[in-house]
Image (spheres, rainbow, N blue to C red):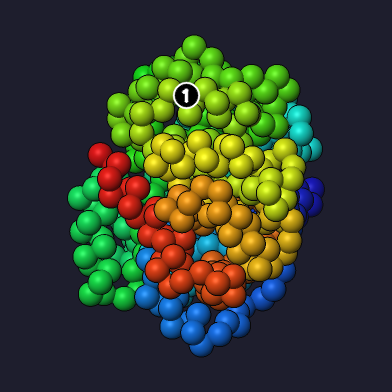
Amino acid sequence: MKKALLVLALILLVALIGVFVFVPSQVEKSMNRVLNAPPYAASDKAKALHQQLFVADLHADSLLWNRNLLERSSHGHVDVPRLIEGNVALQSFTIVSKTPRNMNIEANDDSTDNVTLLSLVEMWPVRAWTSLKERALFQSAKLHEYAANSNGRLTIIKSKNDLESYVTRRQKEQGITAGILGIEGAQVLEGKMENVDVMFDAGFRMMAPTHFFDNEIGGSAHGVSKGGLTAIGKDVIRRMEAKKMLVDIAHASPATIDDVLTMATRPVMVSHTGVKGTCSNNRNLSDEQLQRIAKTGGVIGIGHWETAVCGTDAKAIAKAIHHAVNVAGIDHIGLGSDFDGAVTVPFDTTGLVQITDALLGEGFSEDDIKKIMGGNVLRVLRENLP
């Protein structure tokens, strides 16, 4: 009998190891797909130009997954070795705290949550199982731990001084990259204004009011009511501006976008989006919205997935960028991949050279490509970080 119980216990142990070790990896492999495997082809001219660029990407959800970002992975889209290989100077690591089941771009409520199960399977701290605030703080701590253990390969940018020191270092030193922290949906505040300061102190420098559902702050483009900013939402925007945190209106409802743009006194960002001019759907921005965002001095990050650009290659991304530049101006467009955001993309972060190549094909000058690929983001951060 004892022997049988021991065998049963061993079987259960092996099953649990399978759940906690192998299941998360398989889930991510099924959700963060790449259409084309590396290495990625590009013209010699594009390769040479790409190595001269300060490449900045405004959106990746890599901290959500149970991968060591200091090690090169065979799946997913972003890790430190691949950022360095792709000559990515700055990656915005945006945290996801909650997503609804059967998530779609039309209408979702907040009654279900995929991240709860993921947090259990990936063995997040118990405090993060039920608290959206703690999920944000846990993911921030992960990035800080990666940076501390990276032997200088990864720097976290929190201030103008951090940025300038890093830029100077990068001019002399190869094999390094940097990250900046953002939040996808202010539900992490749990309805409390004081949590804006908590997020700032944890290193976050950009936050979107909403993600895939309406919350206490405002309406989502994919929510049920799709309303504008609430009273506390307006207070949150004011507090963010006072703290010199950038407001990100990706996923916001038209009413929330209007409210943010009406009250904004600093540049407004869009970390990842498409444009209706080349891909008309509820996820993407109109020409009028592009122009209003540009007037704040902000940057619009063009996404790399099919819903954003109605295509599955770098040419579709470059076409969307071209339209956005024509509407908003060359100083207000950047990259917003949505890497590791449960999307399928043409390439991982080592393939961004294909966008450089496609922009050359669209007739952009080298100076304009430098702005699009990261120069515009660098300018806004230099002028607006604390």
Q: Position of residue 37 (x, y in %)?
A: 66, 76
Residue at 37% x, 22% y is 238
Please give left or right for residue 14 compared with residue 348 in the image.
Answer: right
Q: Eyeballing the image, is 97 above or below 152? A: above
Q: Residue furthest top?
A: 231
**Residue 105 in view of the camera:** yes
The x, y position of residue 292, in whole percent, is: 50, 36
> Which amino acid, by three-letter code, is at mark 1?
Thr
**Residue at 49% across / 84% down in the picture?**
45
Q: Quadrant of the C terminus?
A: top left
Q: How many marks?
A: 1
The part of the image, by quadrant, that contains residue 7 is bottom right
- Decide which of 121, 276 is in the foreground and name it: 276
Q: Nearer the viewer, residue 204 or 47?
A: 47
Q: Residue at x 43, y 78 (%)?
A: 49
* Element type where label 1 sits in the image: helix
Vertical placement of 70 versus 331: above or below?
Answer: below
* Image height of 328 relative to 22, above or below: above
User: How far across and how far down the image is residue 286, in percent?
Assistant: 64, 40
Say left or right for 123 vs 263. Answer: right
Residue named by callout 1: 262
In x, y percent, where is residue 329? 48, 51
Could you say which quadrant of the image residue 326 lies in? bottom right
